[in-house]
Image (spheres, grey):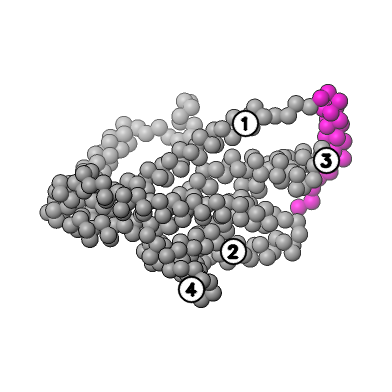
Amino acid sequence: MSGHSVLYDAPGARARRRNILYTAVFLTAFAFAVWWLLSAMADKQQLTAAKWRPFVTDPEVWTTYLLPGLRETLLAAGLSIVIALPVGALLGLGRLSDHAWVRVPVGVVVEFFRAVPVLLMMVFAAQLYVQFSSLSSDVRPLYAVVTGLVLYNASVLAEIVRAGILSLPRGQSDAALAIGMRKGQTMVSVLLPQAVTAMLPVLVSQLVVIVKDTALGGALLGLPELLSQNRTITANYGANTIAAFTVIALLYIAVNSSLTRFAGWLERRLRRARRSGGVVLAADATDGVEEIAATTAKGAGPREG
């Protein structure tokens, strides 16, 4: 039996022909959909060079609209990420606390803010800033967007941190406790560094969500972020809506792709550091650790559920 057929049945001749047929039908339907879309855009004069030329020949489109909008998007997302990451980590650790007076209130906070839509929190925050602060109308949308993003995403990140730490083998914490480390030391020095590496793909996905969710502030609160610049561009450059949306989408893709590549580089670096950063113990210290581990193993009975 081949290694491939262990996991699934190898397709026979009829199944291969059927798969080829399905692939050909899908590609044909996809090509037809693309042709129909381009034809519809051409009929609406959305593919003419005049609609796309300003993004190539007119630097004012970039200096007046796109780059300021991108800067506002990155500012709102950056502030939200910088605040939400540590707050989410603290909330996640709080949910793992042995003390009910810490664990229960933190759990209520996390579940509440995870359940409320982020747009609703932005609106509430904007109204609170109107009623109880002296912020000017120019910066109020930014504060409201960052507040909503932090409250929602810190709660989501808390669950990511909690799940990442709980996914680690129980032996990690048992070994740390066996050599005399306190629970706080075990969490900070042993469990959290390993969990961060395991959680990194999910964390990056959530950070990408933060970048995209800044567009909600532009749609409802008047934040001059990147996506909202479409309205002013189309108003000043001949209703080139498709071209403006396409360029804005490419900018979002570039930002989020850069964030993903950075996270991949960071993950590889962390894994290399874990492999090469082990602590070498002296012989007497090693003997002491082995003696503690042996004693712990002999005295360990079956755990009660």
- Mark closer to the chain start, 3 or 4: 4
Using a 10 Å C-alpha cutoff, classify the residue at mark 2 as few (fewer than 14 neighbours), some (14 to 19) or many (20 or more): some
Q: Which mark is residue 111?
A: 2
Q: Earlier in the sequence, mark 1 or mark 4?
A: 4
Which image quadrant is residue 114 in? bottom right
Type of amino acid under label 4: Val
Residue 257 % position (x, y):
41, 42
Q: Position of residue 84 (x, y in %)?
A: 56, 55
Tell me what residue is drawn at x 18 percent, y 51 percent.
51
Q: CA distance from mark 4 to mark 2?
A: 27 Å
Q: Are marks 2 and 1 in contact (CB under 8 Å)?
A: no
Q: Which label number is shown at residue 180?
A: 3
Residue under numbered circle 4? 130
Give how far apart the Cα atoms at labels 2 and 1 are. Answer: 35 Å
Magenta residues, start to end: 282-305
Q: Along the polypeptide, which appears first: circle 2 or circle 1?
A: 2
Q: In front: 163, or 87?
A: 87
Element type at mark 4:
helix
Q: Could you tell me which residue is drawn at 31 percent across and 54 percent down?
A: 65
Residue flagged by tag 1: what amino acid is it?
Ala
Residue located beneath label 1 in the image: 273
